[in-house]
Amino acid sequence: MRTLAPVFEAIERSALRIREAITNEDTDYAAQSNQSGDIQLKLDILSDLIIAEEFSKVPLIKAIASEEKEEAEELNASGELFIAYDPLDGSSLIDVNLSVGSIFGIYDGEWSAQKLIAAVYVVYGPRTEMVTAYHNNVRHYIYRHGRFKELEQIRLQDKGKLNAPGATQQGWSVKHKSLIESLFSEGYRLRYSGGMVPDLHQILLKGGGLFSYPGTTDKPGGKLRKLFEVFPFAFVYELAGGIAIDEQGTRILDLSCNDPHEATSCYLGSRYEIEKVKRDVCGLG
Ligand code: AHG
């Protein structure tokens, strides 16, 4: 039977090298932007190179697509897996020493949400942690004494307490604004750092809540990218017992993707909060 162990090991090696780079390198800007128009830090580029180098050692990987690269790239003609990754998500937070992360979506044979077979993310914070979603389990690891040690499996409760609303309020729709206000009036706490990896990680580990990044007046299709960011986290959330939808109420993992850098609006959370999104934002049910 095929094992993804060599892929997970390559991600672990990459994570340790990126963690080292975050600690030791400057947060200078490179003289270029990525495909999404974000100005790249030298650290974004370095992290991308590290991951591409580690993945090139794994014959099972056929192709990679990175948030930092314009086009997907073939690594091994005889490989099977397509891996999309955001090497250093939230990198603009490094200069203020907030947590950042790397996100990986592992696709079987094509760039399609329906072919996602595993997702992994790494959080670089006061501690380095990794979460893998694969084979019906969401496993949580911490890097300690030279290795990733497995902690508890992650399971979302049906209702949480945290509210992480992305984007500028000025650009929100009336329905989205009223959803967010309604959650606060129910007692939800604001927890938003501006990095989706630590923000979604916090909701997962603290039992539940809602992370939202809606379409806005300046970015009607949303900001977060499907292949590198939203599909992998939707996969993690579903396996943990949560739900992930877009603002029309469509399940994220049923969406199509026609370009590696295509974005979507997204709502990820526990069941109670997503049912509320369906009623209040999508007009369903
Ligand atoms: P970047 O990698 O360019 O710093 O973007 C981070 C992403 C994501 O991690 C986060 O949830 C979102 O952008 C934050 O955007 P807003 O500041 O618009 O809420």
Image (cartoon, grey):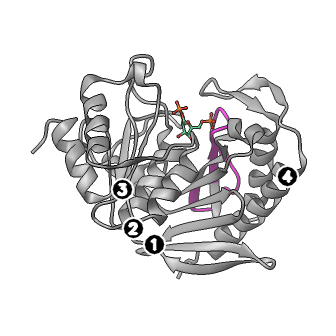
CA–CA distance between discs 3 and 1? 17 Å
Residues marked 3 and 1 touching at CB (< 8 Å): no
- Where disc 3 sits, the SS reads loop
Under mark 2, the amino acid is Ala
Above or below residue 78? Residue 251 is above
- Residue at label 1? 154
Q: Nearer the viewer, residue 90 or 170?
A: 170
CA–CA distance between discs 3 and 4? 33 Å
CA–CA distance between discs 4 and 2? 31 Å
The earlier-in-sequence mark between 1 and 4 is: 4
Under mark 4, the amino acid is Thr
In the image, is 158 to the left or to the right of 37? left
Between marks 4 and 2 in the image, the one whose residue lies nearer the viewer: 4
The image quadrant of residue 216 is: top left
Between marks 3 and 2 in the image, the one whose residue lies nearer the viewer: 3
Under mark 1, the amino acid is Ile
- Residue at label 4? 23
